Image (cartoon, rainbow, N blue to C red):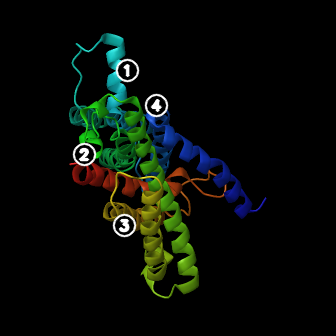
Amino acid sequence: MTNLQRRVIVAAVGVPLILAVSFFGDVLFFLFIILVSSLALREFYILSEAKGARPSLPVGIVIGAGITLAFFHGGLQRWVSGLVGDSFWFPTQPQLFLIVSICGVLLIMLVELFRTKGSAMANIGVAVVGFMYVSLFLATLVGVRELFLPLDFPMMRYFQSESSFFDPERIREVYRWGGYTVITVFVCIWLCDTAAYFAGLGFGRHKLFPRVSPNKTWEGSIGGFVAAVGAAIVMKILLLDYLTFVQAGIVGGIVGIFGQLGDLVESLLKRDAGVKDSSAIIPGHGGVFDRFDSLILVAPIVYLYLDFVVFS
C-alpha cells in the first residue's frame, strides 16, 4: 500500500468520525478532545527529550485532562448536581480553570522533587509549557462547543423571546449551531491546508519561512487564507445563521492566519528536535501533533473571538 493510499483510507475513516463527534458534542466530543490532546501532549514531550528534557508524561496528561474538564464546565456541573443536588457549591468556569492550573503547576514541581531524570528546571518548564500550549489550547475547542448551551448563549439576541430559554427545539437548534461551528473550523483548516499546498505547487515563487519550512511559499499561504475565508462564508450561508458575513469572514481569517502559524510553530519544534514527524501513530499522516498543529493555535483565538466579541 502506497503512502497516498494510506492517507486516503485514514482520511475516509477519520473525517466522518471527527465531523460526527463535533456535531453531537457533549461527553462524546469532550472525550475526543481528551484523547487528541493526550496523544499530542505525549508527542510534544517526546520531542523535548531530544533536547535533554524528561517531563513527567502521566502528570502532564492528568493536568491536561483537568484543564479540558474546566472547559466542559456545564456538563460537569450537571453531573455533579445530579449526584449531590443543587445545594452543593460548584466553582464557576474561571474558578475551576484557575484551580486546575495552579494545582497543576504545583503538582509538577512537587513531583520533580522525587525524580532524578534530566534537569529539574528543563523538566518543569517543558511540562508546564506542554499542558498550557497543547492541552489548554485544544481544550478551548470544548469551550467553543459549550458556548452554545442556553445559559451561555445570548438567546434573546437571536430569538427575542424569553420562552426561547425553555423551548426544547430552540435549545437543540442553538446546540446544533455549536456543532456546525466546530465543523466549520475543521473544514476551514482542511481546505486551507489543501489550497495552500496546490497554490504553492502551482504558483509558489517566494519562500515564506525557509529557516523553518523550506517548501512553504507566500503564494501558497495566500491561497490557503483565501480558501479558509471562502469556506467560512459558504458555511455561514449553509449552516451558521447566527453569524453575519463579516463575522464568518473573520472566523475564516483566523483559521487562514493562525492555522498556518500553528503549522510553522510545530515545524520549528520538530526541526529543533531533528525529526520529520512527531510520531508514526497515524498511517500516512505522521503523529497526532502533526495533524492537529493548526487547530492548536486556531481553537483559542476562535474561542476568544466568539465569547468576547460575537457573544459579548
Q: In x, y percent, where is residue 117?
A: 41, 41
Type of the residue with mark 3: Gly
Marks 1/3: CA distance? 37 Å
**Circle nearer the N terminus (2, 1):** 1
- Residue at the image position 28 percent from the left and 31 percent from the top: 163
Secondary element under disc 4, as helix, strand or loop, is helix
Secondary element under disc 2, as helix, strand or loop, is helix
Q: In x, y percent, where is residue 145?
A: 39, 42
Type of the residue with mark 2: Arg
Contact between labelled residues 1 and 2, with CB atoms less than 8 Å apart: no
Residue identifier under label 3: 253
- Give the quadrant of the N terminus: bottom right
Residue identifier under label 2: 157
**Circle nearer the N terminus (1, 3):** 1
Q: Which mark is residue 27?
A: 4
Q: In x, y percent, where is residue 164?
A: 31, 34
Marks 2/4: CA distance? 27 Å
**Circle nearer the N terminus (3, 4):** 4
Residue identifier under label 1: 79
**Circle nearer the N terminus (2, 3):** 2
In terms of image quadrants, where is residue 218?
Answer: bottom left
